[in-house]
Image (tube, rainbow, N blue to C red):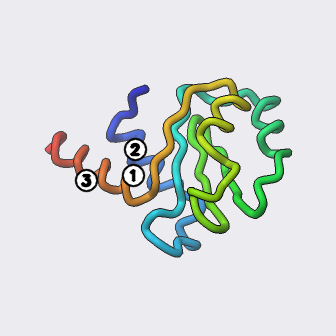
């Protein structure tokens, strides 16, 4: 899976949880290998994640955990299995650091 600096910048700008950030780890971002099918995405949306939420935008899921990533049922494995797409999930602090590194390599 590969994401360009421009795509990463778009992911950061489109963060639907920007007003709700309680710590630097939230939200988490699941980078999907492809845009999920609407039917499979609906299956994921119907699952009960005990207060954990997500927002889908194209090939990205923004994840917000009610408690913590270590206590969630909304794991990368569940995302991959339900959506039938490869995924990698990173916390917000890591996403921002990746943008800093991308900026350094493009300037």
| Camera-nearest residue between 10 and 43 | 43
Secondary structure, mark 1, is helix
Q: Alpha-carbon distance for marks 3 and 2?
A: 10 Å
Quadrant where the image shows the N terminus: top left
Q: Residue furthest front?
A: 71
Residue indicated by mark 3? 100
Residue indicated by mark 1? 95
Where's residue 43, x and y in %?
82, 36
Q: Identify the residue at image location x=62%, y=25%.
A: 85
Within 10 Å of disc 3 (Cα), the crowding (few <14, some 14-19, many 20+) is few
Where's residue 59, x and y in %?
57, 35
Residue indicated by mark 2? 8
| Camera-nearest residue between 100 and 107 | 100
Between disc 3 and disc 1, whose residue precedes?
Answer: 1
Secondary structure, mark 2, is helix
Residue 24 is tagged as: none
Q: Alpha-carbon distance for marks 1 and 2?
A: 8 Å
Q: Residue furthest right?
A: 46
Within 10 Å of disc 1 (Cα), the crowding (few <14, some 14-19, many 20+) is many
CB atoms at circles 1 and 2 under 8 Å apart?
A: yes
Name the side, left or right, on which 106 lies relative to 12.
left
């Amino acid at each position: 899976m590969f994401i360009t600096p421009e795509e990463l910048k778009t992911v950061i700008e489109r963060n639907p949880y920007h007003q709700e950030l309680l710590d630097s780890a939230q939200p988490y971002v699941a980078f999907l290998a492809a845009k999920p099918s609407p039917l499979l995405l609906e299956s994921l949306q119907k699952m009960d994640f005990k207060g954990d939420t997500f927002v889908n935008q194209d090939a990205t899921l923004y994840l917000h955990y009610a408690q913590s990533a270590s206590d969630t049922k909304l794991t990368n494995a569940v995302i991959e299995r339900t959506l039938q797409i490869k995924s990698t999930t990173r916390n917000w602090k890591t996403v921002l650091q990746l943008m800093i590194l991308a900026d350094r390599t493009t300037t």
